[in-house]
Image (spheres, rainbow, N blue to C red):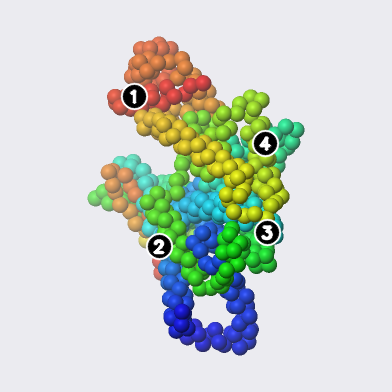
Amino acid sequence: MNTSEEKGRRTFLGWVTGVIAAVIGATVGIPLVGYTILPALKRREPEWTDVGPVDSLPFGIPKEMACIHTIADGWHKTTTKKSLWAVKDKTGAVMVYSPICTHLGCGYRWESEQQKFHCPCHHSFFSVDGKVLSGPAPRPLDTLPTKIKNGRLLVIYKEFKAGSAAKIEL
Amino acid sequence: MGQRMYQWLDKRLHLGPVKMALLNEPIPGGASWIYVFGSITLFFFLLQMVTGMFLAIYYSPSTEHAYISIRYIMDEVAFGPFIRSLHHWGASAMMVVIGLHMLQVFLYGAYKRPRELLWIVGIVLFILTLAFGFSGYLLPWDQRAYWATQVGINIVGTIPLVGDVLVRIIRGGQNLGAMTLNRFYALHTLFLPWLVMALVAVHLFILRRVGPAGPWDEVRAARFQEPFWPKQVAMDAVAIGLVFFIVVAFAIASPAPLANPANPSDTTFMPLPEWYFLFYYQLLKYLEGPWEIVGTLILPLLFFAALFLLPWLDRRKERRPVSRPMVMSAGVGFLAVVVTLLTISIREVSSIPKLDPSVLRGKILYQELDCAGCHRIHGEGEATAPDLSYVGDIRDRDWLIRHFRDPQAVVPESEMPEYGLNEQELNDLTSYMLVLKR
């Protein structure tokens, strides 16, 4: 065997080894990159939570409802119970308010005698449609996305930054 | 570019001699396809390391979360099923290639002087690989994992005198539970990888000191030599590529299984070990009562003692298989027994009727109707209504169906509500009740 033939043979065998290594590397490597980064980049879809039948809401009177809110952190799912205020107007449309006062984040409640929402911390008052009537609250009550499906009220639970005039989702 | 980078490094680190030492190892008799198995084994060990490290990104080693974290990998992580299946089938492939590697060494008498140490380190690596397989099997914490490990550990328990203590040490306590999962996890992902890496280094170091054995025909071996690079490396690469893509095909066609979450009270589950332990599982079926210990202790001890002592049991210089009739027939005999047991076992396993789908649907119905709110099965559920653990022994299909249709018509004092089940639901729930037997 002459040397140039030998050199060609060696180059060929080296090339075979290199190609196989590259193909195996790519077959394992590309899925591994996707496996590692794609779940981290995936945006969480907001989840609709069923808070109860729409029929149970009286017209024009806010009702406190419980919302079992599930937060998925990968495989770790935590459920927390939050309360919400829901009001059905005369047309049957439903407004749902976040349970947190827009001033500093206290829980407020409905005063049925005064027909107002009242936050006991710093005495902000809100009307039944969420507008600020008096007190330090910088913006109306925060409304949440709602929809009605098969007579059930569905809500996407969100929280917003307290104390600012703009409604900023946390 | 690559060439220039290499030159830059070479000027500083003087890589020439290292490269020569790594690649110019002389192979007596030249490169051959029969020598590829060691390299394939090493490749699969590295693949298991890589896929294993990445699985650990999402896996949680606790009895509460192990199962759902694997479920998450299988259902929600991009390429998750592929990576886990590569790890799953890679383990099987590793067993196969280790077996072939050992057979080649055995056939070629390559364990003989001066390579006794190489063989012994290899046997230790083989045992550690079995430990890898056993410890990894538990980690998904599904029914297969739980019950197969339960049986595996109980085998250790049959050893006289020390059995009970050993079982407690392996389990990390009295029961198979949180402590077991954690120590299996630590063993599988920390202790064993480091130990195997170190021993692989020792294995390769010894190989380089004593050199590969080459053909059993000494004249042929002495006739010419060929360096490891490039022909043997290319052959190894082709063989690795071939086995790797077989494993990829398995991973895609048959993803790694995940049964229901581990449930210690579910007695309907039929545990099976991984296929490479099946022949042993079959052997144990034949050895009952006083013979049990032969299977659980004496035969494994004899087997591993024979493996370790092989270089001294077969100490003549002669390496040709035809001149070693005793050793060869022992080897062939062992293989014949293993293959026979494996065949019988696979046949028996595949002839077991799969769990009736009607039973499964009935079980789901049992959960949906919250029957456990009043009834108890093997300690689970309330005890206000009759215990159903062995209801299949005392009631027949007809009685059960009539009773589900109208409980008070059959048992007037019954407080069970009428659920208004349709025909199929009645049948499914009844099928489930009927498997609850002693």
Q: Which residue is mark 1?
A: B427
Does residue B312 lie above or below B401 as drawn?
below
Q: Is residue A110 left or right of residue B169?
A: left
Observer-side mark, 1 or 3, equals 3
Looking at numbered disc 4 in the image, what kind of residue is underneath it?
Leu
Report x, y in % for residue A166: 41, 69
Q: Position of residue A99 (x, y in %)?
A: 44, 54
Q: Position of residue B193 (x, y in %)?
A: 62, 58
- Comparing B232 with B366, the one in front is B232
Residue B368, located in which quarter of the rendered image? top left
Which residue is label 2 attached to? A43
Give, as a three-letter code, the residue at label 2.
Answer: Arg
Residue, disc 3: B115
Marks 4, 3 in one chain:
yes
Viewer can see residue B273: no
Q: Residue at horizontal 56%, vertical 30%?
A: B285
Q: In terms of secondary structure, where does tag 4 sit?
A: helix
Please provide percent x and percent y for residue B299: 65, 37
